[in-house]
Amino acid sequence: MHVPETNQETFAYLYAIEVGLRELFVDVFENEGRSLWKQRLPNDLLNKMRDARIDQRSTRWYRTVPHHPVYYLDFADLRKVIERSDNWGETV
C-alpha cells in the first residue's frame, strides 16, 4: 500500500504538534505542583486516562513504559485541555 508523500508529511507535522502540546501540559502543570494536572483535566478525560492506564496494566504481554498520564489522551482530547480557560490564566 502506497501512502502519498503529502500524507506522510502532514502526519509528521501533526505528530510533532501533538507531542509538543503534551510536553507543554507536562511542563506547565508539573511546575505548579505534582497533582495539579489532575485538577486541570476535565472529568471525562481524567476518567479516560485512568481507564487506559488500568487497561494497559491488565494486559499481560504488554510492558508498561512510564509516561506522564497526559500521554494516555488522544490528540482530539488535548483540545479540551486547551479550551479549558482556567488552565491558562495564572500560568501564561
Image: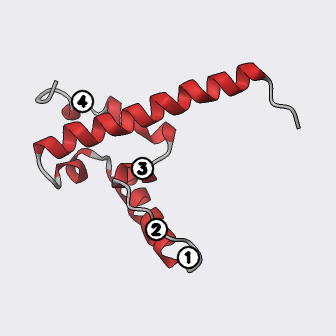
Viewer-closest of 71 and 37: 71
Query: What is the crowding at mark 1: few (fewer than 14 residues within 10 Å), some, or many (at least 20)?
Result: few
Is there a contact, CB below 8 Å, between mark 4 and mark 1? Answer: no
Is there a contact, CB below 8 Å, between mark 3 and mark 2? Answer: no
Is there a contact, CB below 8 Å, between mark 2 and mark 1? Answer: no
Tell me residue 13's x, y (percent). 55, 24
Q: Please indicate, yes or no, whether residue 10 appears anywhere in the rendered image.
A: yes
Tell me residue 62's x, y (percent). 56, 71
In the drawing, what numbered circle is on residue 59?
1
Task: Tell me which numbered mark, 3 or 2, is placed earlier along the sequence.
Answer: 2
- Residue visible at 59% across and 77% down in the picture: 61
Identified by mark 4, the residue type is Ser
SS assignment at label 3 = helix
Task: Tell me which numbered mark, 2 or 1, is placed earlier along the sequence.
Answer: 1
* Residue under pointer 3: 71
Question: Relative to residue 59, is residue 47 depicted above or below?
Answer: above
Cα distance between the residues tagged 1 and 3: 18 Å
Identified by mark 1, the residue type is Thr
Cα distance between the residues tagged 2 and 4: 33 Å
- Residue visible at 43% across and 66% down in the picture: 53
In the drawing, what numbered circle is on residue 85?
4
Cα distance between the residues tagged 3 and 2: 13 Å
Q: Is residue 61 left or right of residue 69?
A: right
Task: Tell me which numbered mark, 4 or 1, is placed earlier along the sequence.
Answer: 1
Q: Nearer the viewer, mark 4 or mark 1?
A: 1
